[in-house]
Image: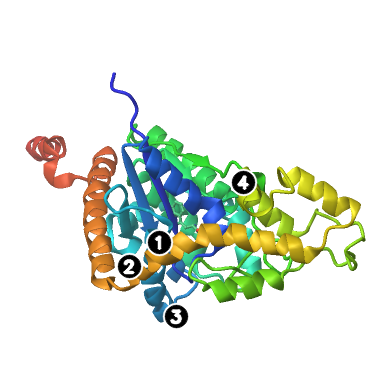
Amino acid sequence: MAEKKKIILTGDRPTGRLHLGHFVGSLRSRVEIQNKQDYDEMYIMIADAQALTDNADNPEKIRENIIEVALDYLSVGLDPKKVTMFIQSQVSALTELTFFYSNLVTVSRLQRNPTVKNEIKLRNFEANIPVGFFTYPISQAADITAFKANIVPVGEDQLPMIEQTREIVRSFNRTYSEVLVEPEAVLPSVKAALRLPGIDGNAKMSKSLGNGIYLADSKEEVKRKIMSMYTDPNHIHVEDPGNVKNNPVFTYLEAFATEEHFQKYLPEYPNLEKLKDHYSQGGLGDMKVKKFLLNVIEDVLAPIRERRAYYEARIDEVYEILKQGSEKATQAANKTLKEVKDAMKINYFEDKELMNKHKENAHVR
Ligand code: TRP
């Protein structure tokens, strides 16, 4: 038997530029996977249709951010020769699949989806949830299954979506026939990267909280943000013992700093453990740690900024990448849609059996 193909799909809502939280949570591992070349197909989707489910009155915001997200993808090093980047709304099979899968999902199951629950609360949607928003997990199942993706690299908040997708796959395959593939989520391996806090110490880096460091931020902006970062509020004097827990400066170092960074910028310490020890005992000032963090983050962001400038000067090329990617994605998704319709027996014009049955019945009558 042929070895199982490795098909990867993941995506982002184009509601704003991508930040360091996206980078450690997912973009970084996408680039690693890409560079290992250990896959058959990799699809990266700009989820504009999903973004519209809670932005119906603001399509302009979504429109403008499609190209921003594409620039972020290209600038972190995703290579259009190796991965297929596409725009969700341009692949109409995804919408059809969503409609058919809807029949396999109950309202109460959707109500139990913890991510949707949380998002409804955050948006104060309780009394007036748009149906499209409420059912976006079904559309996400379509995104994943249309490409028969078996690997979905995502952040922790997306686990309920993958679980719901797996249920839809099992239900479809049981009800009709074995067409769809159950995906697995792949989370970042570094714990600090599961949820990067904001520079203000809030548990989550997010656009709406205005506490993020963006991939497109200038060197000056990054410096300003890091130097103003929240740390341990009780660590007032250098000699005071400091707390490294719930201290975003240290969480960022966990997510980004390598031993090479220590050798390069802070050779007095062999690794993060030793730096933490010193901070906890007292005698290590915030400024010194922040300066180190700035060097580490700049090592990450400088090449990203350079690639961004390259593609910003070639916007036509970026559009062409998305157009060709969307065409390729359309072909793949159409193939699955055909199989889905065959399995559901809604391929009437090719169904000789159905036609013959009616002919025979006509005779009997
Ligand atoms: N829900 C994801 C997010 O908010 C975006 C997304 C849409 C996605 N479809 C997907 C992620 C399919 C992985 C697979 O970031």
Q: Which residue is mark 4?
A: 258
Q: 9 or 330: nearer the eye?
A: 9
* Quadrant of the snapshot with the N terminus: top left
Work out whether mark 4 precedes mark 1 in sequence or the reverse, and give the earlier one: 1
**Residue 286 in sight from this viewpoint:** yes
Mark 2 C-beta to ligand 1 under 8 Å:
no
Report, in whole angstroms, how far the alpha carbon at label 3 lies from the one at label 1: 26 Å
Q: In terms of secondary structure, where does tag 2 sit?
A: helix
Horizontal arrangement in the rendering, residue 198 relative to residue 219 (left or right): right
Name the amino acid type tagged 3: Asn
Q: Which residue is mark 1?
A: 75
Query: Which circle marks residue 98 in the picture?
Result: none
Report, in whole angstroms, how far the alpha carbon at label 2 lies from the one at label 4: 29 Å
Work out whether mark 2 precedes mark 4 in sequence or the reverse, and give the earlier one: 4
Report, in whole angstroms, how far the alpha carbon at label 3 lies from the one at label 4: 41 Å
Q: Which mark is nearer the camera, 3 or 1? A: 1
Report, in whole angstroms, how far the alpha carbon at label 4 lies from the one at label 1: 22 Å
Name the amino acid type tagged 4: Thr
Residue, x 59% and y 41% (percent of image)? Answer: 189
Q: Which mark is nearer the camera, 2 or 4? A: 4
Residue, x 28% and y 58% (percent of image)? Answer: 91
Q: Which residue is mark 2?
A: 311
Answer with the quarter of the image where residue 310 lies.
Answer: bottom left
Q: Which mark is nearer the camera, 2 or 3? A: 2
Q: In terms of secondary structure, where does tag 4 sit?
A: loop
Q: Which mark is nearer the camera, 4 or 1? A: 4
Q: Are marks 3 and 1 in contact (CB under 8 Å)?
A: no
Residue, x 35% and y 49% (percent of image)? Answer: 43
Q: Which residue is mark 3?
A: 58
Q: Residues within 10 Å of mark 1 (few under 14, many from 20)?
A: many
Q: Residue furthest right?
A: 240
Mark 4 C-beta to ligand 1 under 8 Å:
no
